[in-house]
Image: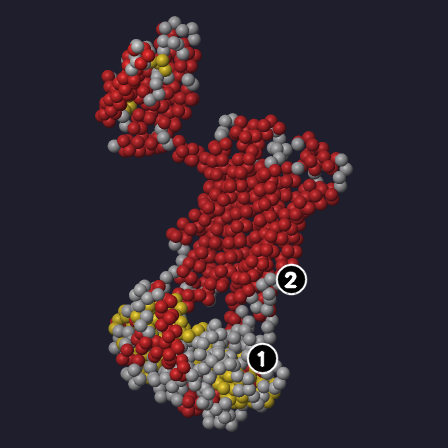
Amino acid sequence: MGDDHNDLLQGTLELLVLKALSLAPMHGWGIAQRIEQLSGAVFRVQQGSLYPALQRMLRRGWIRSEWRTSEHNRRARYYALTPAGRRQLSTERSAWERVSAAINAVLEVRPASEEA
Amino acid sequence: MQMVSELRERLRAIVFRGRMERELEEELRFHLEHETAARRLAGSAEPEREARLALGGVERVKEAVRDARGVRPLETLVADIRFALRSLRRNPGFTVTVVLILGVAVGAATAVALVAHRVLLAPLPYPAPERLVRVDQRYGSGGYGTLSLVEIEAVTAQARSLEAFGAVRYVGMSLSGPAGPERIDAGRATAGYFRALAVRAARGRLIEAGDNAPGAAPVVVLSHAEAERTFGSPERAVGQSVTLDGVSHTVVGVLRPENRGLAGPPTDAWAPLQLEPPTRRGPFGYRGIGRLAPGVSLARAEGELGEISARIFPIWKASYQDSTARLVPVPLRQALFGYARAPIGLFAGAVALVVLAAVANAATLLLVRAAAREHEMAVRAALGAGRGRLARLVATECLVLSGLAALVATAVAAAGVRLAPAVAPNLPRIAQVQMGWEAVALASVGCVIAGLVVALAPLSVIAASGSAAPARLTSAGGARTGAGPRTSTARAVLVVAEFALAFPLLVGAGLLFTSFLRLERRELGFDPSGVYALDISLAGAPNANDTTRIEFWRKLEARAAELPGIPAVGLAGSIPPDNYGDVNNFNLVDRPVPAGTTEPTSPWPAVTSGYFAALGIELLEGRPFAAGDSAGAPPVAIVSRTWAAKYYPRESAVGKQLVSAGCTTCPLMTIIGVVSDVHYRGLAGEADAVYVPLAQDPGSDRYLVARSRLGAAATFRALRSALAAVDPDVAPVGVTLVERVDASLGDPRRWTLVVGAFASVGVLLAAVGTFGLMAYLVRQRQRELGVRLALGASPASLMRLVVRQGMRYAVLGSAIGIALALLQARWLGPLLFGVDAVDPRALGVAALCLLAVAALACAIPGLAATRIRPIEALSTG
């Protein structure tokens, strides 16, 4: 793994997929590309875990899939957000914000010795 | 919402499995193409390989996606079942054997359970049946007896703990019809009898209190079947009249179809029992049934009935002196069906042993198979199947076997239920046993449980050997990969268990068979062939008294004596071998029982001399009954040889005197003779009897007994014509004594057959188990045995080696079996006649038989051992 790439945090993959799909429906490879691109190439999606994650999200009804013709005139499976997925995105987003705010707050604290 | 989508997706995953697989394939190919193209653009030298690496293996991703579908367990199960069916089909011999063993055993157990439930446990068909009791008289000696008018009146008037109480006496009645009189089963009952059982009339009314008063107008309640038979329909019956025993009775009501019998034998006519003021305790023969008042416990009722007994019995001391006797309430179901517990316990015990033996046997076969498949399992393990997955395969296989066995078990149970009334016709309610869904469920659950228990055996092999599997694989050659010590111990334990379980079955069958033979060869005391009887009842004859009855019987006997082809004819109150007839209590004048204790009883047939002649009962001592032994003359009796030997072992009984029926104010009865034995208490019972002259005890129910040269049909015709000449309104029942003797042997014969069948199955199972195990062991030790042969061992010594090992199991199993056989003696004892339940000969014979079977089962594999060719064994090993 390159140094400039970070593996996705456990559990954040779904949040990023939801976010990516909230912009536009796309196929699996496109989702992976989009996440890398959006994160400024900081995150690299483990392609092997993307498809099982999509399958799980389908099962939970957050996304739906359909076969469409891609830009290169190829049949491809496109995923799109469902209303339930949209709700899930906002839930996960606020959860994430709470967590990251909390982590930031923890990181802001300076040791007493440094202040002295 | 989420649940719905989950369900939908999972359903899609199962139903459209093939399509989803194709789509997944296409999606991943699309992904790889794009990734490859992107990497090629980025200047990669090996874009395809890199793309593949980035994805992390197509097959792995596919597996992960399949897992994410959430239907893996189900898919695996389906695959496992397919696999199990395939592998079972490859071994039809094994599959059929295991399925039959489990199916037949569980099916038989299901049938026995259905019978036990129906006969013993099913509630009585009356409202709140748990509150019903039968009021019996318990003697100081521990026996139970029926009631007389004294007890009926006392309990009816005084028992507060009983909400309702009534009594019945079953009688045969003659129903006059256009085609002559017909004998029907009838009961004389009090109004309380119907109230206690809480039955209602389908039409009209039941017997009411006023009907029981002496002198009330004669009424009758008919069974539904009888009303339909005689009048076409219950509606038409009410208000009509029928002639019973020559008296016109008004039909006041009809019972419902399900009330053909009321806590007793099938009964077609119910007449009121007339409650005359009693003059003494006795005659007995009435059955009392009560309903406990709400909230009253059995113990409280017992207490109250005890108090009533203590108050009433002393008053009637002159006629019945047993001051230890008490009235007791017995729960009705127990009172009616309790006697069925012994035979049902016998069947249940036998079938339980068979089921255990079957499970042990199936487990042995599966263990042998598992050991033989160790190589296959090792290959699977090496190819990546986890130990859990292997265990699941084996467990699934066992469940599939259970499922197939359940089909067999259901069929066997259905056959058993159909056979039950033929196998045990004397059990109550046996005809009501039915196959239902609960029976199918019971058979299936039984098979699944048996299958799971059986599965433990091969699972233990996997647990023991799983970790070492790949290592075993390297040693190659299925024949050489021996079983670990633990699995061979398990197999030995199972085979020992099979012998231990077969042993008590064999002993039980042997004992029952011996007992049956003893009964069959028991001295009957008479030759039943050519002896016929008419069962005649005058119970309901109007204005009958002793004088008219004496006259009736005298005329009848005289008429019958004139019949051609009938050399001997007489009258009797009982007929052998198991017709109780009258039983009476007595007290010897010269050696009475202590005051206040129970007097001895004996069958008490009232007979004419012609009866002795008809049966060929010989006078051994004293004189026969004579014309002078008439109603007014001093009472006399002739006793049987057994009776004489029991009460006067060292002196002659002739001339001794006794007090009859506890009547201290009556004239003493003198013994005038001793005759040869016949049985009245059943072939297994004592042959004691006290005969009294019919003229001194005319009674209303007697048999006209004839020795005839005519054959059954002609004899009955002749006897009936004699009866019709005396009274055309009396309907008799014909009895053939050969059939009576045969019927009295029926239960022991059938029990012997059932237990014998179970025992044969048990022995067969032990033999199959031993044979299977030894044959396997010989195959497995082929190489070793080959080496022994090559080194000069004689074939005979190999045979000895194999047989010795097998016989060790058989001997150990039989030793444990002896302990089980001693345990079962307690249950078996009461069913046996003339043989001890721990008869050492029976144990010895059973042991010899089992060992012989074991030797045979070992000899065949032993023979195979002697035929091993060292060269082949060593090269293939």
Whole-percent x and y of residue B65?
Answer: 37, 25
Separation (CA) of disc 1 from disc 2: 30 Å
Residue that mark 1 sits on: B646
Eye-nearest disc, 1 or 2: 1
Residue that mark 2 sits on: B841
| Chain label for disc 1 | B
Q: Is residue B807 left or right of residue A102?
A: right
Colour scheme: secondary structure
Q: Seen from this angle, which residue lies furthest right?
A: B792
Whole-percent x and y of residue B481?
Answer: 61, 33
Whole-percent x and y of residue B654?
Answer: 58, 88
Q: Seen from this angle, which residue lies furthest front?
A: A116
Q: Is residue B799 left or right of residue B496?
A: right
Residue drawn at the location 39% of the way across and 16% of the way down: B55
When asked about the image quadrant of residue B482, the answer is top right
When asked about the image quadrant of residue B9, the answer is top left
Residue drawn at the location 62% of the way across and 40% of the way down: B776
> Which corner quadrant holds the N terminus of chain B?
top left
> Which corner quadrant holds the C terminus of chain B?
top right
Tell me the crowding category of disc 2: few under 14, some 14 to 19, or many 20 or more residues within 10 angstroms, Cα based: few
Residue drawn at the location 52% of the way across and 29% of the way down: B381
Q: Is residue B468 above or below residue A73?
A: below
Q: Is residue B376 above or below residue B548?
A: above
